[in-house]
Image (cartoon, grey):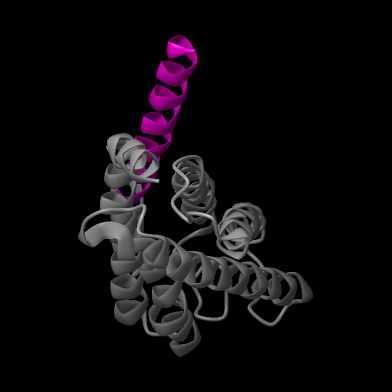
Amino acid sequence: MIGSDTHTNTSTRSLGLACAASGLLAAPLAILAGTRIGEVPDAQWSYPHPTGLFLVEGLLLVVVHLLQAAGFVGALRLGAAGNSGVGRFALWAGVIGLLGLSVAELWSGLIGGKANDSSAATTVSTVFGITSMVFALGAIVGGIAVVRAGVWRGPWKWTILATGVAIIALVTPANISGSLPFRQTALLIWSALFVPLGLDIARGLARRAEWRAER
């Protein structure tokens, strides 16, 4: 039994550290997203980057979203949503949204040379929109459940909720605006939220134990 607990603790800590690493990996990608490199037509899907670099970015963003999803799985393992079935379902929806974003990033990277008004670009934009909203709604509903459950201790209990709000209030408007500096700032803020979220998950095991003992 002790060995099982130790394995669970180690696995959950690894999930948290993976989530924190996603923020560190995403930060330079967010800065790069707002930097024009080379002579790329504005109407090309890969703008402001050439297709080769755009594909590499897409592959790295696949990794980022998978690492972010690890954080949500860690929160579920910690029982962060308490007894709320809706909260747990919402957190899983957040995981599904992030997995969907991984697919969208890979697809996006593969069509970098297409025009923005091409059918492929329109389809990928739709996938981004749907999966982003699935993630955002999951994070918001799940985040509210986490805050209300009281399992999570400290100021970072708000970060799951904040990741969902940031998608709706910052990232989506930035993508629609077409402003590179706005997009850069929005992605930096969103990515940064996963660092404290992941670190809190990595060291949240004692808090879970304390909560269970109180019950």
Which residue is found at the position 54% from the left and 55% from the top?
83
Which residue is found at the position 29% from the left and 68% from the top?
189
Residue situated furthest right in the rendering: 119
Residue 16 among magenta residues: yes
Toward the viewer: 67 or 186?
A: 67
Q: Which residues fall within the magenta stretch?
A: 1-23
Q: Is 99 displayed left or right of 162 in the figure? A: right
In this rendering, the answer to whether 158 lies above or below 213 is below
* Rendered location of residue 180, percent (x, y): 35, 78
Which residue is found at the position 51% from the left and 46% from the top?
76
Toward the viewer: 128 or 163?
A: 163
Q: Is residue 169 visible?
A: yes
Which residue is found at the position 69% from the left and 75% from the top?
126
* Rendered location of residue 94, percent (x, y): 57, 60
Residue 34 among magenta residues: no
Total labels drawn: 0
Q: Is 95 displayed left or right of 193 in the figure? A: right
Q: Quadrant of residue 35?
A: bottom left
Q: Magenta: predominant secondary structure element?
A: helix
